[in-house]
Image: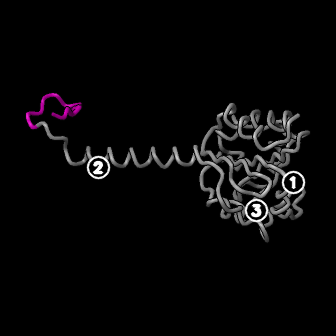
């Protein structure tokens, strides 16, 4: 005997309305997709960074393949994104705690963020980690594409994804993954 939970107890027909079953499938599928994004392990192949350039805070080009060789924490963010601004102290904490041990920490601002606005935020929030702008949007494309901010990745030294998360990061989990990628202190 199966039991169904109904929110409308006045119904005499005990079958769920057809739109409820569709909504339930959609919610479960969406939850599964978000879990997969947040719980992903190391991918088999590297992110194709070769030939992709972004710009530094002075507008000079930077090759994204310069990230290879060291583990990297990279946060896609925007100055107008409340979650991104809330996450800045956590990203700064990663810089303060792990940069000396070899972790690259990068904030990659989205293409729609003007460089002057990015520079103002960096100064206002005292962000000492590397900040680049994805002026062309190619950086976001090769990472998925990234369409929502904040989106956070940890890459191993070969630019394989060790962790990715849409939304605010779980610092305990992030630090555990970083510790596993870095040489012991």
Question: Which x, y percent locates residue 103?
Answer: 84, 44
Q: Residue furthest top?
A: 9
- Disc 2/disc 3 C-alpha distance (Å): 40 Å
Question: Which x, y percent locates residue 174?
Answer: 70, 37
In front: mark 1 or mark 2? 2
Residue that numbered label 3 is attached to: 135
Indicate which disc, 3 or 1, sits on the residue closer to the N terminus: 1
Specify the quadrant of the image occupied by residue 122. Answer: top right
Q: Quadrant of the N terminus?
A: top left
Instruction: Tell me the SS state at disc 2.
Output: helix
Specify the quadrant of the image occupied by residue 160. Answer: bottom right
Question: Which x, y percent locates residue 120?
Answer: 83, 44
Specify the quadrant of the image occupied by residue 167. Answer: top right
Q: Which mark is residue 57?
A: 1
Indicate which disc, 1 or 2, sits on the residue closer to the N terminus: 2
The part of the chain drawn in magenta is 1-13
Q: Indicate whether 60 appears above or below 41.
A: below
Q: Which mark is residue 22?
A: 2
Q: Quadrant of the C terminus?
A: top right
């Amino acid at each position: 005997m199966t039991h169904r939970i109904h929110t409308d107890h006045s119904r005499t027909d005990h079958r769920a309305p057809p739109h409820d079953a569709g909504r339930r499938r959609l919610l479960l599928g969406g939850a599964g997709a978000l879990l997969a994004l947040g719980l992903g392990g190391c991918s088999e192949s590297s992110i194709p960074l070769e030939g992709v350039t972004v710009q530094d805070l002075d507008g000079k080009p930077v090759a994204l393949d310069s990230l290879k060789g060291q583990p990297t924490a990279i946060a896609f963010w925007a100055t107008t994104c409340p979650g991104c601004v809330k996450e800045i102290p956590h990203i700064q904490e990663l810089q303060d705690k792990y940069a000396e041990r070899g972790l690259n920490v990068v904030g990659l601002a989205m293409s729609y963020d003007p460089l002057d606005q990015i520079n103002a935020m960096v100064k206002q929030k005292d962000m000492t980690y590397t900040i680049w702008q994805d002026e062309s949007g190619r950086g976001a494309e090769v990472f998925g594409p990234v369409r929502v901010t904040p989106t956070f990745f940890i890459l191993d030294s070969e630019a394989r994804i060790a962790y990715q998360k849409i939304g605010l990061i779980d610092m305990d989990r992030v630090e555990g993954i970083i510790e596993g990628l870095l040489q012991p202190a």
